[in-house]
Each structure stands twice: as structure tokens, then as C-alpha cells.
Amino acid sequence: MPNQSRQEGTEYVLKMAKEHDVKFTRLWFTDILGILKSFAITTEELENALDHGMGFDGSSIEGFARIDESDMVALPDPDTFQLLPWRPREHNAVARMFCDILRPGGEPFDGDPRYVLKRNLKRAADMGYTFYVGPELEYFYFRDSKGTETLDDGGYFDMTPRDTATDLRRETVLTLQELGIGVEYSHHEVAPSQHEIDMRYTDALTMADNVMTYRLVVKEIALKNGVYATFMPKPMFGINGSGMHVHQSLFKEGHNTFFDASDEHHLSKTAKSYVAGLLKHGPEITSITNQWVNSYKRLVPGYEAPVYLSWACRNRSDLIRVPEYQPGKEKATRIEFRSPDPACNPYLAFSVMLAAGLDGIEKGYEAPEPVQENVYEMSDKERERRGIGMLPGSLIEAIQLTEKSEVVRKALGDHVFDAFITNKKIEWDRYRTHVSEYELKRYLPIL
């Protein structure tokens, strides 16, 4: 449904609910850690919810760092109304809408990740920009949630009988399309039982909602077929982890500001300053784009995940790549930020990437020369000579860099910034004090 006035949106939702005999509408919102939260209302409550919102306990947004119960209001966004394809369709259908979280007085709640992204998009809009993103989310299918038994031994783009998940992917793509989400590609990824479905690029707010929907759809379709899907960044030792490469561009008055026909790489000065901003602030935004202890098991050299602060055209070992599928095409010109993983909070991840890039544009940062060699194969001395730094190697290292970051604090706002750091320190402490199977096997027999 196209953007329309709130009144028109409300009328559209009520009409659709009546036409499709919707009995329940799920109100969706996201907590600080990017976990989808939901409660259901009956159709009798729908008009009131659209006009005034529905009250709920806001402490559910805070992640592990629970605070005392606090009253909040979930105001559904009528532009996000969709019927859920995996629920009954003829009678007693179920729909969903994403919500903006408000304080009881009606002002936006600054702890709402969707509001954080809206604020950052407004900053871009005030500079004349629309932020477009196209994330590529990888994930694994396993037999169940208790282990990592794979469904196939397929490899990158394989189309063989071994790829038993082809039907699962097909059903997932069709379901996403029913939910109004455009899909460009779907294929088998590098690792056994690893897959990727790429959504068609769109504005960042729509895409953040789409990422939340996508993750749920992938899991729902897997569950329906008796298997388990996971977006865990690195579920298996010695095998590629799952990333979420994010293609991004800034448009102004219908034109792609990243495009310059006269440049060797077709990249404008704006694009290069954006790249420079991402390279400069990459380490301090990493705790947001890679927010779990397990994320850092993926960010190690040798498994296609980037760890070095460099950019290149074509080369896949760098943090930022300039895809060259359609060189010289204005609309196709974009940069690809390769470190994020699919278990991040998309509202916050898109916010900090945009903030880092805009900082580069505002301050006129200059990008270093692109690196055309494989950075993994360089010696430490060579990387040092060329000024190529690294991403943080653990969650605690990433948190400590974020804590000092003015760019991230400004992007997230004080509430989310402080709550996020608190959450991550709790997680690190739980991990740090846990005695793992590895330690028992390694040390118990010899110490």
C-alpha cells in the first residue's frame, strides 16, 4: 500500500480487515536487541488502536536490562498492514502491523528502535537525501534447534538434488511476496545447508520492517516443514558464518548521489566521503552491526567475512566493496558494507551505518586508495604500512570502542545508547563466566 495520510490509511486497514474477515491483528514492535515482540488485538479494537494506540508494558523493549514496569502505547502504522499467509485465509484471518512506541502523553518513546531510525532518516532528509538499502541475509537450515545437523552438502549456487531446501526457499520467497516484499535472488550459499534470499532495495525504514518480517517468515516456513532455520552468525566451527552484506546509496531529487560517470569507478565525491566515514567509524559501530558474542566467531580471517578496514571494487576480502555488476549504470551504483550479520537489530544497524557515512560527507573525509590485492594475504607489516586497521576481535572490545563514540551516541540517542551498552555488558559477563564444553575437554584431563 502506498504512503497516504493517516486517515486514509486507517480507512484502508478497516476496509481490508472487513473484506478478509480478519479476526486478530498482531501488533509488532522490536526491542533494543532486535527481537520481534507482539501482542494481538481483536478486530473490535482495531479502529481504537489505529486512532489512539494500545497500552502495554514498555519494559519488554529493554532486552536483558529490564527496568521497572512502565506504561507505553503501541500505535500501529497503517502502511504496514498485511495478512499473515501462514494463518487461516478464508475465515478468521490474522493480520499484522508494525507499531511506533509512544509515551502515554503521545510523544515518541526514545527507546523505540524504529523511532531511532526515523530520527536518522530525518537527518539525511534535512540534507536532501533518501537512504536506500538492500541487505543480503544468509541463514542455515538444521534438522532441529538442538544441534547443527545439516539438510544437505550443497555449495555456492548449487542446483543439485543435494539441495533439499530448494522447496523451502521457494515457499519462503512466495510468502515474502504475498507480504508485499520484493525478492531479487535466492540461492544456496557457500556452506552446507546455508542459504540466502536477497530482498529488492528500498528505503531504509521499509527495509528494516522487511528484515524483521523476513527473519520470521524464514523461521515459520522452516517450522511448518519440520526443520529449524537460524540467523546465528557462526553456528559451526570451521565453516563460513552467516553475514548480512548491506548495499547502500543516497538519492537526491530522484538521482543517485553516489554516481559519477567521469570517475574511474563511477563513484562520486559524496560516495567516497561516505565510504571514508564508514571506514573511520567502522570499529565503533561494530557492536551494533555485530552485537552478539557469537558474531566475533564469524569475524575472523579466512572465511569470507571482512576484518580489515579497506575498500575495493570487486574484491571480496574488504570491509567495503563497490559491486560492478552493471558498471556505469546510475541506479545500480552503490557501496556494499560487508561486516554486519543477520542477527543484528536492523533499525539500529541502518542508523549507525548512515550516521557514519553522513559524518564522512559532512566533514569531507577523503577515502584512501582502493585496495585491489587480497588483504588477508598481506603481512602485518604491509597492512600497517598502508594504514589498514582491523575491526574489533571480541564483543567486549567492540563495546569499549562504542562507549567512546560520539557518532554512535548521537545516532542512537542517550536512552538506546546506554541501554544497549548495559545489555551487551550483561551478555559479555554471562559469556565470560560460563565454563564451556571446550574448556572441559581441553583442560580437565591435564590440569
Image (spheres, grey):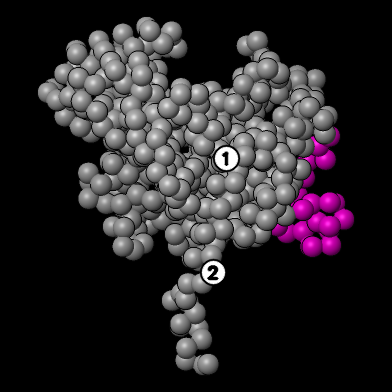
Asked whether residue 158 is drawn in magenta, I would say: no
Q: Earlier in the sequence, mark 1 or mark 2?
A: 1
Q: Between marks 1 and 2, how big is the CA–CA gap?
A: 26 Å
Label disc, if present, on residue 415 of the rendered structure: 1
Label disc, if present, on residue 377 of the rendered structure: none
The picture quadrant where one finds residue 101 is top left
Image: 438 above or below 251: below
- Residue at (19%, 13%) from the top-left corner? 18
- Left or right of residue 413, residue 356 in this image: right
User: What crowding class fits label 2: few (fewer than 14 Cα within 10 Å), some (14-19), or many (20 or more)?
Assistant: few
Mark 2, residue position? 432
Image: 365 above or below 253: below
- Residue at (43%, 47%) from the top-left corner? 68
| Magenta-drawn segment | 366-389
Asked whether residue 381 is drawn in magenta, I would say: yes
The image position of residue 158, as x and y in percent, is 42, 46
The picture quadrant where one finds residue 314 is top right
- Residue at (66%, 40%) from the top-left corner? 409
Image: 212 above or below 434: above
Q: Amino acid at mark 1?
A: His
- Residue at (51%, 72%) from the top-left corner? 433
Q: Main secondary structure of the magenta part?
A: loop
The image position of residue 419, as x and y in percent, is 55, 47
Q: Residue furthest right?
A: 385
Quarter that holds the N terminus? top left
Q: Amino acid at mark 2?
A: Arg
User: What crowding class fits label 1: few (fewer than 14 Cα within 10 Å), some (14-19), or many (20 or more)?
Assistant: some
Q: Is residue 101 visible?
A: yes
